[in-house]
Amino acid sequence: MTAAQNETPDEGARSELYLVTPVISDAAQFLPRLEPVLRACPVAAIRLRLAPGPREVQAGVIEALRGPIQEQGVALMLDGLPALARATGCDGAHVDASDVVAARKALGDDLQLGAFCGMSRDLAMQAGMEGADYVSFGAFSETSDAEAVALLRWWTEVMELPAVAEYVVSGTESEGTAVADRLMRTADFVAVGTEEDGAEAAGGVWDAPFTLLRTIGAASQGLLS
């Protein structure tokens, strides 16, 4: 994942959209929800969260979803499991900041590596030094205060390493809101997920009419080319 060249935060720059799936054990059940979302708005990447299980079962889920995702020019990032990400043709993996060294070794130098850093500037700096290609901060929601967003703003103003804002949508939200808009003007990518797990989980991200996604996607089109 390579960030577009942002303007100064809050001066017209817009993030790219990075979707986070529910925890998935059944690819066939999730596919009918995936394809309409990919048609609804521009998506830079999808982070695939897999249910625990045998490696061969997890690999089967990846194989079923990888084609529909990558054929649309969307990067497929596996949540954790960097060795499996490499073995199954994913574009990279997303891990906790404490796991960056081991994950980089498993992925090699040619795949993307993201590091979740919570709200820690120090963890983000360390992850960058250890080989992360992006750092993610959060989780943010509509209850996040200005201080939380300020950390993200500081990073994007001072550091070159791309920043992802992890934005969690509750099942009752269906459209863009004030915090989501501020994140779109600050982060390089906004990772949008829901609180629900499971391929059948309802929520404003993975179900029609995709109001939130269309709002964010329309806002990001100026950066996606």
Image (cartoon, rainbow, N blue to C red):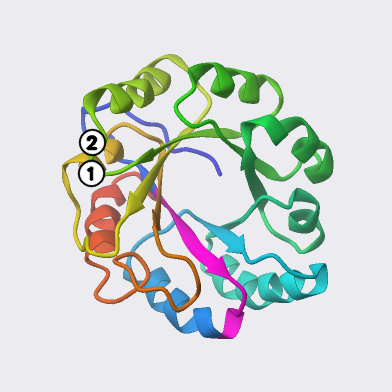
Residue 137 in magenta stretch: no
Disc nearest the viewer among 2 and 1: 1
Which x, y percent locates residue 157?
37, 18
Which x, y percent locates residue 103?
76, 40
Which x, y percent locates residue 70?
59, 66
According to the image, label 2 marks what residue? 182
* Residue 66 visible: yes
Q: Is residue 180 left or right of residue 24?
A: left
- Name which residue lies at 51% across and 79% down: 30
Identify the secondary structure beneath mark 1: loop
Which mark is on residue 142? 1
Q: Quadrant of residue 100?
A: top right
- 118 and 184: which one is in front? 118
- Name which residue lies at 29% across and 40% down: 184
- Amino acid type, mark 1: Glu
Residue 24 in magenta stretch: yes
In this rendering, the answer to whether 88 lies above or below 182 is below
Q: Could you give the CA–CA distance between mark 2 and mark 1, rounded to whole angstroms?
A: 10 Å
> Mostly what secondary structure, the magenta segment?
strand
- 199 and 67: which one is in front? 199
- Name which residue lies at 23% across and 25% down: 146
- Amino acid type, mark 2: Arg
Identify the secondary structure beneath mark 2: helix
Estimate how packed mark 1 is, as few (under 14), some (14 to 19) or many (20 or more) residues with alpha carbons within 10 Å.
some
Q: Quadrant of residue 175?
A: bottom left
Q: Is residue 142 left or right of residue 72?
A: left
Q: How many marks?
A: 2
Highlighted magenta segment, given as a residue range: 17-28
In this rendering, the answer to whether 158 lies above or below 27 is above
Which mark is on residue 213? none
